[in-house]
Amino acid sequence: MLNLDAICNGVIQKHPYHWIFFDNLIPKPQLVELFNSFPYNKFPQRPGGLILDQGAEVVTNAEKFFNAAKNEFYIYPLPNLNSLWQTLVDELISPAYREAVTKLTGLNLEHYLIRIYLSQIDSTANKNLAPHKDSWFVNNKDSGMALSHLFYFSKDWDINWGGSLQILENEHRESVVKEIPPQLGNSVLFLCEHNAWHVVSPISPNAVQPRQHLMVRFYDRQIYTKYLKGE
C-alpha cells in the first residue's frame, strides 16, 4: 500500500528544521476506504489512542503504565481493526518502511522502537493548543524520540475549517513557514530536533467533520526503555 519509493526519493527540507511533505504515499482508493473505516468508535469520548507500542514489552505492567501516563491509550491490536487498517499498520512496522525512512533522513533506525497513534479532534479539542516541539525531552526526561510521521485522513476538508499543521520558525505562533491542511492523503514527516516548533491551527466550530490522522514515532530503544522504567 505505502509508496516507499516516494519516501526513499524524497528531498527533505532543512529550514527551519528537517521536514518533508508528501501527497502520494497511499493510493486514492485505499485512502477513501481508510477514511470511511477510520476507527473513531474505538475511542469513546477521547481524542485518540495508542494502537501500537513496541516499548510495552519493557514495562512490567503495560496497561497500568499507560493508564497512569495518559488516560486515552489502547494497546495494539485494537479489537475489530479492519483488514485494511491492519495492513497499513503492518507496513508501517515493516523493515522496508524503516529502511525507506532511514534513506530519507540519514538516521540509522535499525534498533529504534515504533509507536503508532490514531487521533480524531474537533474544535473543542485543540482550541488552547500552543506551539510546541515533539521533543526528545518529556517532563524534563529524555524519551529518545527521534522523528514523527503524520498521515491525514479527512476527506473533503475545507481549509477554512483550520486544523492545519503549521511549521514554525520559532516558538511564536505567527512565525509560520509552511501550512499543511489535514486533507486526505497529505502526510508530513519531521525530525524531533531542538527547534522543531509547530502547532495545529484552531479548528472552526463550522467544521462538519473531525480532523483525523495517524502518527508514527520512532524512539531510541535504550533511551526509551529507561524513560518507560522511570530511570
Image: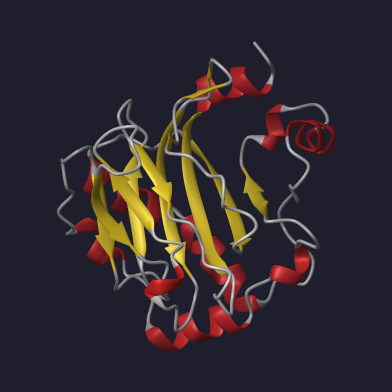
Colouring method of the image? secondary structure
Does residue 126 appear in the picture of this structure? yes
Farthest top residue?
A: 231
Q: Is residue 147 left or right of residue 73?
A: left
Q: Give the quarter of the figure containing the N terminus.
A: bottom left
Q: Residue furthest bottom?
A: 29
Residue in the picture at 34% in, 52% down? 166
Residue 182 in the image: state x and y as whole percent: 42, 67
How many numbered tags mark residues here?
Answer: 0
| Residue at (50% x, 53% y) in the render | 215
Percent x, y for residue 51?
A: 66, 54
Residue 136, quarter of picture: top left
Residue 210: image x %, image y %?
59, 70
- Vertical order, 170 against 29 (above or below): above
Tell me: 94 left or right of 138.
left
From where the camera sits, is residue 93 visible?
no
